[in-house]
Amino acid sequence: MEKISKQTLQRLPMYLTFLKQRLTNSLDTVSATVIAQALGLNHVQVRKDLAAVSTGGKPKTGYITHDLISQIENFLGYNDCEKAVIVGAGRLGKALISYEGFRNYGLDIIAAFDKEVDIINKEISGKPIFSMELLKKTCIDHGVKIGIITVPVNNAQAVCDLLTNSGIKAVWNFAPVHLQVPEGVLVQNENMAASLAVLSKHLKQKNKQNKSRHT
Amino acid sequence: MEKISKQTLQRLPMYLTFLKQRLTNSLDTVSATVIAQALGLNHVQVRKDLAAVSTGGKPKTGYITHDLISQIENFLGYNDCEKAVIVGAGRLGKALISYEGFRNYGLDIIAAFDKEVDIINKEISGKPIFSMELLKKTCIDHGVKIGIITVPVNNAQAVCDLLTNSGIKAVWNFAPVHLQVPEGVLVQNENMAASLAVLSKHLKQKNKQNKSRHT
DNA sequence: TAGATTGTTAATCGATTAACAATC
DNA sequence: TAGATTGTTAATCGATTAACAATC
């Protein structure tokens, strides 16, 4: 097992969904070639990725689907959940809190925080919304290491500072800003604006092509 | 203006938010160095990115903040919105429909579609939810080119096929599966599972470091 | 003028892909 | 055995970074 790149890390969940699908269809073994084809990747890349997490497959047979699944899940820590808090109980925040599926990905959101008085001390899908004042104590008491930011852009940095001051070591940021964090804290941006940029540029180019074809 | 990489494309929205902040603080000019420092990037990279979309800055002064903003916005097509439909009006779907901010990013969600009878023909934040049967007609009638998928994994490919059959040329996919699409159609994955993988791995490594330090 | 800054050309780095040997 | 497949070592490719010239 060698050092793993961020790219590899991000492909592992894709392998996982594919492998699970495959197991549902009672296909007990799987080759790197099959995975590569299904996911539109290069087969050597798949093999390298798998080498980083698994004990290996057998020539001619491939990998044992079931084993590979548990090896990847194990590697990603999907078995033992990390606790997380979410700051900002707006529409997006609520959607994330309510999504039960995160537990399968090793994430356990224990509470939400918001400054909106109307919703404080209420619940969403059985999870409490607390006032911002309780953030630090909650994180420390429960050993929470993951903070999710779903507040508007202008509050994001302040919330981030608060989180890192509360012992958070990994921030999942949904606000389209670059956050400054102390060393040792990881920020993972879920940058929807960036995704949209890619989408709309693709369409712009397609349009241009069509136009030039007609003239 | 040379060919632009996907990476550059994804950084442009970051520049934009920073530049707008800067304008709010009445800072009329900006240098690549300042941008780079603020966003944790290399200054040459920033300059290259900007070269792809702007008419250039002036030595010693830098770029005119306001001009740069409109050049980036123009390049990304934030001025003229693309119409989009969203399939799957669950929690996440609802959150995305309701988020007014997308219009600033050039995205105009005109309707949602779902197979759940209870919510069909109702509205969310003033936008209609239709039955799946109306999807194709709606897309064609309105010339919709962007489809957003927020359905569970097992329905995602079927929904995707339906979308591409309805003239969709760009798919924004929130389901954690790899989608097969005809040539010329772009899939942009908002892969939360992948993000979570990065976050949890970071924590696992930190834990390991701490443990080995204590023994 | 001196120096801050832009913009370009070359070097580096890392990830992907190709080629090949090993094995069941 | 032959061939499908794994796994590794080398080549390629693209993006990032470094070095430098140009300019206000």
Image: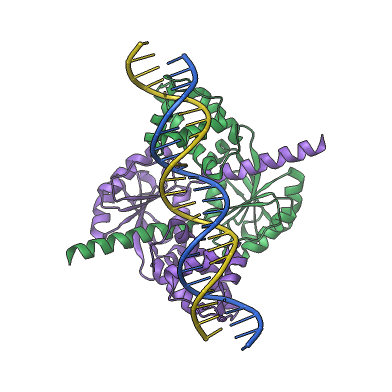
Chain colours: A green, B purple, C blue, D yellow
Vertical comparison of B131 with B78: above or below: above
Q: Is residue B78 visible?
A: no
Q: Looking at this rendering, what residue extends furthest in the right direction?
A: B215
Across and down, in percent, residue A65 comes to 47, 24
Q: Residue at x 28, y 47 (%)?
A: B183
Q: Quadrant of residue B175?
A: top left
Across and down, in percent, residue A46 comes to 46, 34
Vertical comparison of A31 with B73: above or below: above
Q: Residue at x 52, y 50 (%)?
A: A95
Q: Looking at this rendering, what residue extends furthest in the left direction?
A: A215
Q: Is residue A77 visible?
A: yes
Q: Residue at x 45, y 20 (%)?
A: A59
Query: On the picture, is A13 further left or further right than A117?
Result: left
Query: On the picture, is A164 further left or further right than B34?
Result: right
Query: On the picture, is A39 further left or further right than A115?
Result: left
Rendered-image quadrant of the N terminus of chain A: top right
Across and down, in percent, residue A172 comes to 60, 51
Q: Nearer the viewer, residue A173 or A14?
A: A14
Vertical comparison of A30 with D9: above or below: above
Across the whole image, how many numbered discs are drawn on residues? 0
Rendered-image quadrant of the C terminus of chain A: bottom left
Query: On the picture, is A200 further left or further right than A49?
Result: left
Q: Nearer the viewer, residue A210 or A134?
A: A210
Across and down, in percent, residue B103 comes to 42, 65
Vertical comparison of B78 with A58: above or below: below
Q: Quadrant of residue B203?
A: top right
